[in-house]
Amino acid sequence: MRALFLLTWLLMASLADAQSLREAFQPFFRVGAAVPSTEGLPEDETALLTRHFVSVTPENLMKPEALQPREGTFRFEAADAFLDRAKQLGLEVHGHTLVWHAQCPEWFFRDGASPASRELVLERMRKHITTVAGRYRGRIARWDVVNEAISDGPEFLRPSKWFEATGEDFLVEAFKSAHAADPQARLFYNDYQIESGAKRGKTLRLLRLLSDRGAPVHGVGIQGHWSIDEVPFDDIERAIIAFHAEGLRVAVTELDIDVVPRRVAGADISVRDRATEDPYAKGCPDEVLQRQAEQYARLFTLFRKHADKLDLVTFWGLHDGRSWLNGWPRQRTNYPLLWDRELKPKPALDAVLRAALE
Ligand code: XIL
């Protein structure tokens, strides 16, 4: 019994050493990670990134506020450096994101003291997309063309400034402009919680609307910001099947499993949690890490089952110390990813690797 236990333990302990995520999932789908930069990343993190991942997403530096903070003033230095270094490292880049209501400067929507007209807003959006996607033509595998346009409320589309100015037209035009600027890039609609409840139906409605209006959409990104013990496995499966049945590819674009209780659901970055608790400031209980590992394994088993529909699974961060969930929706010490703050593999890494080998 003891020997068997030891053997199992040894086998498990060695899995993380022997296997990389990219190799383990190579027959199924690409595995990616979001990072703040590629050229500014410390050496040990770069080693982790290239060993385990095929794809990399810039966490912030291709968002509208980063690329065009003022009208006509494009800042490409950081994004250029990101792409150059990614290429050197042999990583493919997932572009994030051309059109979003958050991290988007106000000037897009103003005309002096008044709100900008529909035409002006669309013209600015087209120019932004044409300039950005055109500059990186042929170098971006996939673009998140529009992020989070579906409403969490009773209405269909989010009442964002984009929507207020143009109705649903900005979505149609965004995909058309992106395709014209970079015909090779696969174009995705990306959003959170679209696997569940009313948002799944609204996503299908949006995809059909886009297709009816001739918008070149190739895929749907399910962000995948889930919480421990609340991962909606059945909904995820139904959503993958339903989106694929629309003739689209599916990606999981921002995967993490939050382990610290919070009152805010979803992933709306403008929503804050007033609580101040930081229950795992001194470390995460083993039992929680084990539960997280089991849930990650279940997820990857599910992803494997639907590998024919999935292009990519990207984690939103490289290791626990780099996760946005340490700061959103409040300051917390979080443990959502596969490596800890010292870059040591967590039980979740073994569990995910095992899901590939089963
Ligand atoms: C987050 C970044 O990780 C943070 O660094 C930034 O402060 C806010 O945005 N959904 C998205 C991502 O589509 O762009 C968000 O990224 C996380 C939620």
Image: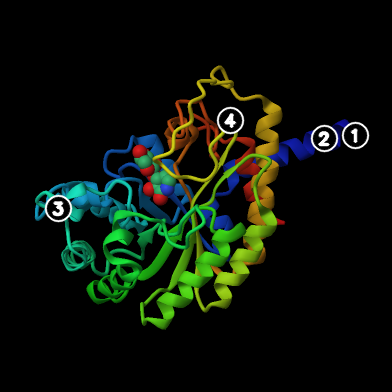
Disc 4 and disc 3 in contact, CB within 8 angstroms: no
Screen quadrant of the C terminus: bottom right
Nearer the observer, 357 or 78: 78
Nearer the observer, 160 or 282: 160
- Residue 134 picture location, percent across and down: 20, 68
Q: CA distance from mark 3 to mark 1?
A: 76 Å
Nearest to the eye among marks 1 and 4: give it. 4
Look at 52% across and 65% down and name the residue there: 202
Look at 58% across and 49% down and name the residue there: 19
- Residue 98 picture location, percent across and down: 29, 59
Look at 54% across and 58% down and name the residue there: 194
Vertical relation: 347 (above or below) 102: above
What amino acid is at disc 3? Ser
166 vs 202, left or right, is left
Disc 1 and disc 2 in contact, CB within 8 angstroms: yes
- Residue 36 picture location, percent across and down: 33, 41
What amino acid is at disc 4? Val
Going from the N terminus, do you reach mark 3 or mark 1 first?
1
Going from the N terminus, do you reach mark 3 or mark 2 first?
2
Nearest to the eye among marks 4 and 3: give it. 3
Vertical relation: 160 (above or below) 117: above
Q: Which SS class for mark 3? A: strand
Going from the N terminus, do you reach mark 2 or mark 4 first?
2
Q: CA distance from mark 1 to mark 2?
A: 6 Å
54 vs 16, left or right, is left
For ligand 1, which image quadrant applies?
top left
Q: Which residue is mark 4?
A: 260
> Residue 6 appears in which quarter of the rendering?
top right
Disc 2 and disc 4 in contact, CB within 8 angstroms: no
Few, some or many residues within 10 Å of mark 4 (<14, 14–19, 20+): many
Instruction: Check mark 1 vs ligand 1: CB closer than 8 Å? yes or no.
Output: no
